[in-house]
Amino acid sequence: MLAFSTCWNNSRHIDGESMIDEIIELGFSNIELSHDMTIAKLPGIQKAYRAGKFTCSGVHNFFPSPVEVMIDAPDAYEYTSHRPFERKRAMDMTLKTLELAAEFNAGYVVLHMGSTPLNPKKFTAPLTKLVTEGRQHEPDFIKQKINFIKKREKLSALYYQRAIEALEQLAPKAAEYQIKLAVESRSRFEDMPNEREMLKLQDHFKDNPWIGYWHDFGHVQLKHNLGLLDHQEWLKSISPYLIGGHVHDVEWPARDHRTPFTGTLNYASILSHFPADCPLIWELSPSRKSSEIESSLITWKHRFPKRT
């Protein structure tokens, strides 16, 4: 099932219906309602939905955005935060998101679970710089990467437990609405969960049909490019828990949310791990042009006719 995320054009619209109309004109009738959505756009989206203009594949937390957050910040409140108020705000906003997702008959809500207290400017950013300079095989890169992994491992247990506790609190409401909680793979190793933790988390909830894994093509490729995982091997491990994926491409080594077929990803290989009816959501940068997207959609339909 192919769909398109509103993250591409949300910032260019004041009215929700016109935002939906622009996506429909690209050739998509199935839409994921993404984060950074002001509540002012909601009536227009509801109007378009009631008119039968689109079907809603799913929703990305938080939807709508917290009214006090003035920028696109899906991580403004984290379940892993050391501040109780922020953890509660994250929970309250997620419950509201689930309520709205049910209104649009969505199948899932994509969740960011939080992070460990490590500054990406001190860890992911320097590693990315070295890779960009072609120095990923030098001893300094390897030393920095190993130190990063070790440091994160020492810190992670508390934040992993908070992520588990958040899902345990959300699961009954997800079951009530019959909406899956899709825990997304993140682009930075500082974030929670990493791949080892994701497998542990999914195994913890293996008997709960309302919790699963959301594969972000670009996020995982960024960590692949840093030598933190192997994209294909990771998919082999996590595929039993797959709910769906965010589709975008990556320009080497770290520019993601590019239009499919304009970067380095091997889609045929990646898609081989996905069930036939899995939701695949194009999640593209607002800088991508309509003409580029339309052209890529034609290519996609030609190469993957059963994935449309």
Image: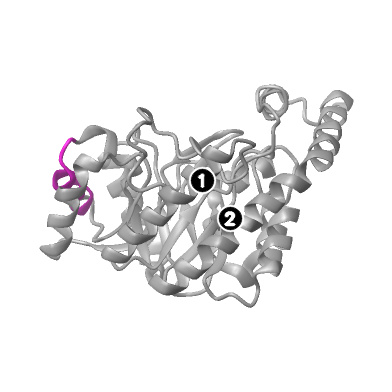
Residue at position x 15%, y 49% in the image: 43
Give the Cα separation between the discs numbered 1 and 2: 10 Å
Q: Main secondary structure of the magenta part?
A: helix
Q: Which residue is mark 2?
A: 166
Q: Is residue 56 above or below residue 136?
A: below
Q: Secondary structure at mark 1?
A: helix
Q: Secondary structure at mark 2?
A: helix
| Membership of 150 in magenta stretch | no
Residue at position x 47%, y 55% in the image: 110
Residue at position x 17%, y 61% in the image: 49
| Membership of 18 in magenta stretch | yes
Horizontal relation, residue 203 to residue 57: left or right: right
Estimate the x, y position of residue 135 in percent, counting from the top left. 77, 25
Picture disc at residue 88: 1
Picture disc at residue 103: none
Q: Which residues are magenta?
A: 14-24
Estimate the x, y position of residue 27 in percent, counting from the top left. 23, 56
> Which amino acid type corresponds to the residue marked 2 in the rendered image?
Ala
Estimate the x, y position of residue 238 in percent, counting from the top left. 66, 64
